[in-house]
Structures are given as structure tokens and as C-alpha cells.
Image (cartoon, rainbow, N blue to C red):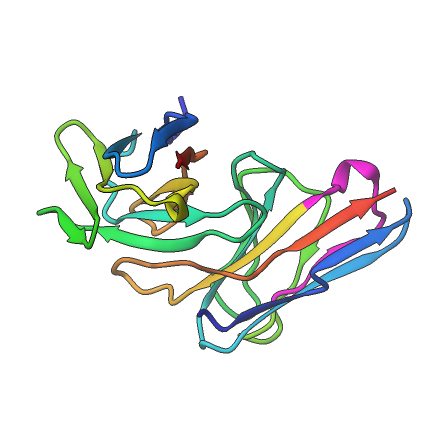
Amino acid sequence: RKEVEQDPGPFNVPEGATVAFNCTYSNSASQSFFWYRQDCRKEPKLLMSVYSSGNEDGRFTAQLNRASQYISLLIRDSKLSDSATYLCVVNSRNNDMRFGAGTRLTVKP
Amino acid sequence: EADIYQTPRYLVIGTGKKITLECSQTMGHDKMYWYQQDPGMELHLIHYSYGVNSTEKGDLSSESTVSRIRTEHFPLTLESARPSHTSQYLCASSHGTSGPDTQYFGPGTRLTVL
């Protein structure tokens, strides 16, 4: 079993839709969680950290469920520019970062 | 924008050549990483470093080697390139602190070995 697992998608949604991605992790000792965004043929860029109490940044909401060992990303009012691959990243206890394989999102007009 | 740079951005070479991919960061980060990523596929960690004179192999075995003589510089070398090495190579760095340790990525080197 992979340490970080994501639904690869693709998720094809119309503009304005709300879409949610989940990511599960296997190491219960994980301390830090992130969502990265990677555009086609570009490098990954930090989208947002995920805090225990959940956090919001504009149209993006991240949540952590330690008991079930998953994190989620909710995107409201999808824009065409949201089309990308979203990578779930989890730190293990020794601070090694584990990247998920990514979930591909395509927002269509 | 992160201050981490990679050169060359694109490289096309013949089999058997020795190549070095350069990575530099000006953020004073202790930790640096090399990832390999094929198009549409996941990132694979091939090397990392906790600081000067520290190098470790990652999860994916690689025929490449790395060195860390200076904090800001983490070059990756392939002694004899083969077509199977064709891929994108991404360098990253992070503070290496005990808290959330965000990684910042360079723009990548797209390598094609003929």
C-alpha cells in the first residue's frame, strides 16, 4: 500500500461547479499536510497547508481528519484556471515528504 | 516566486554521454531534493540532502549521483546517459525545520537521451 493515496481522476467539471478531492495516508505519525498544484509540464507549487482545525483560502478549503487519516480539498465556483493536477503531500515523523500521485482536474466552459 | 534555479531547462543528448544537471537555491535552505517525473506520472524521490556533505538515496533507485559541497548547490550527475533516463528532473529545497517543511521546486530539466 502506498503511503499517500489519491484518486487519479480525471475530474471533469463545468465552470462554477464545486469539486472535492480526498487523500488518504497510512502513517498515523504524520504531522504536516499540504496541497500542491502542478500545471501540465510545470513544477509543483504550494497551494495551501492543511491545519488540524481546517482552513480556507478564498475558494479553497482544506480539511484534516486524523482519526480516518485523510485530508480533503474543496474547490468552490471552479474556474477554467483551476485545471491542473492537485498533489497531496504528507510529512512523516522524520520530516520526509511523501507526495501522492495527484488528482487531475479539468474545468470546462 | 521561489529562488531556486535549474539549468539546463531542456537537454537532448546521445547515449553514453556524461551529464550534470545543475540546481541552485538562494534561500539558505538546508534540505535539497531531486525528483524524477515522467509525463502525467507521479514524482519519485531519487536523492536528498540534509546539508553540506550529506547525501542520501531516495525511494526510487537511480543510476545518478549527487554532491553537496555548498549549501546553495546540489548538482546531479549521470556518468553514462541512456534512453531510459529520459524524463523530467525536478530539484526542490526546504528549510529543514522541525515544523511544517514546505518544499519549493525549481522549474525542472527536461532530459531526452537519444
Counting labels gives: 0
Quadrant of the rendering where the C terminus of chain B is positioned: top right
Q: Which residues are magenta?
A: B74-87
Q: Is residue A79 above or below residue A68?
A: below
Q: Report which quarter residue B15 is drawn in.
A: top right
| Position of residue A34 measured from the top left corner of the image (x, y, whole percent) | 30, 48
Q: Is residue A85 above or below residue B10?
A: above
Q: Report which quarter residue A22 is drawn in.
A: top left
Residue extending furthest left?
A: A53
Horizontal side of B57 relative to B99 (left or right) equals right
Horizontal side of B92 relative to B39 (left or right) equals left
Residue lying at 39% horizontally and 28% vertically, measured from the top left: A12
Q: Report which quarter residue A9 is drawn in.
A: top left
Residue lying at 49% horizontally and 47% vertically, measured from the top left: A39
| Position of residue B112 measured from the top left corner of the image (x, y, whole percent) | 79, 46
Who is closer to the viewer here, A70 or B60? A70
| Position of residue B75 measured from the top left corner of the image (x, y, whole percent) | 67, 64
Residue extending furthest top?
A: A1
Horizontal side of A108 relative to B9 (left or right) equals left
Q: Magenta segment: does it hold A101? A: no
Residue lying at 50% horizontally and 78% vertically, measured from the top left: B26
Quadrant of the rendering where the N terminus of chain B is positioned: bottom left
Q: Magenta segment: does it hold B85? A: yes
| Position of residue B45 measured from the top left corner of the image (x, y, whole percent) | 54, 45
Residue lying at 59% horizontally and 69% vertically, measured from the top left: B5
